[in-house]
Amino acid sequence: MDACIITCAMSGVAANREQCPAIPYTPEDYAKEARRARDAGASVVHIHARYPDGTPSYRVEEYKAITEAILAEAPDLVINYSTGAVGIPIQERVHQITALKPELGALNMGSMNYAKYSSKRKALVFDFVFANPFEDITYLLEQMASAGVKPECECFDTGHIGNVMPLIDMGLIELPIQFSLILGVLGGAPADARTLAHMASLLPQPSTWEVIAISRKQWTLVAAAASLGGNVRVGLEDNFYLPSGEMASSNGDLVEAAAHLIELSGRSVADPAEARRLLSLPAEPDRSALK
């Protein structure tokens, strides 16, 4: 696969502007960041919604306003919604997908410890259990199927890849599958190129995959994914810093750096039309739910 898809995860839910001033809060902010990301080479945007004050929102209303603003600015982008959350009822983790029908819906494929450690403080910055039992995964897959939305299986470790196999056997998910291989979260797979290569080797075929690398190890793993034939995700949800160590002034800066690494690896950057083909998505997305 010569062309490489760049996904931009624009905001996440945890970080705020005290940590990084470029994180978008309002629909207008998201639209500007999406335009910058698209101009730099992104073909997919991964969305966590926020209220205008920056706090996380799981309501359909914020997802709709943000998506409409993004598409008004960059109408050909592939839209990807998150379903990841802690302490939120399962119905509220997916109702934005059934109501608005994005092209992709990300879902986590297993439960795990989810923590961050500070070597300077010699203490955990946060520590919780991210619960995703099969009952919840099955429900999310059924809801996505009812809306005609392709799932994106987020795997934080090799066991999460194994969790996909019975779901295929039950007919809850169909090949080809889109995987996100997430490395660098304490409690999951370490951010190492050898680990990424091993995880990629375990995927059922046919599949497509992208790497999501947390914090500054992102750039080593973007280069590794490009070399291994995978796709990449960057953005302020995952990492604030450019390869130089300078803080990014926008998501577009991070996408531009990823595009440069992809091109240095001898591959091209996929545009949205090519991304849809590679991801087995319809060439013309159905935007009727947003009207």
Image: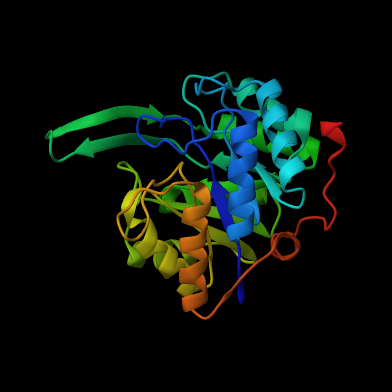
Q: Is residue 8 left or right of residue 282?
A: left
What residue do we see at 38% from left, 46% from top? 240
Q: Position of residue 223 (x, y in %)?
A: 42, 68
Residue furthest bottom as drawn: 266
- Give the colour scheme shown: rainbow
Q: Is residue 70 above or below residue 229?
A: above
Residue 149 shown left or right of residue 268 in the figure: right
Residue 92 in the figure: left or right of residue 121: right
Residue 96 location, quadrant: top right
Camera-side residue of 143 and 169: 143
| Rendered view: 256 above or below 250 | below
Question: Can residue 196 be seen?
Answer: yes
The x, y position of residue 39, in whole percent, is 63, 57
Q: Looking at the image, can residue 202 be seen?
A: no
| Quarter of the figure with residue 287 | top right
Q: Please give the count of numbered marks on the rendered protein.
A: 0
Q: Give the left or right position of residue 196, taking residue 51 as reference.
A: left
Q: Is residue 169 above or below residue 12?
A: below
Percent from the top left, x then y, of residue 12? 49, 36
Q: Quadrant of the N terminus?
A: bottom right
Instruction: Give the percent coordinates (x, y) of residue 101.
Output: 77, 37
Q: Quadrant of the C terminus?
A: top right
**Residue at point 66%, 51% (across, down):** 169
| Residue located at (35% from left, 60% from top) | 243
**Of residues 219 and 107, the one drawn nearer to the viewer in this rendering:** 219
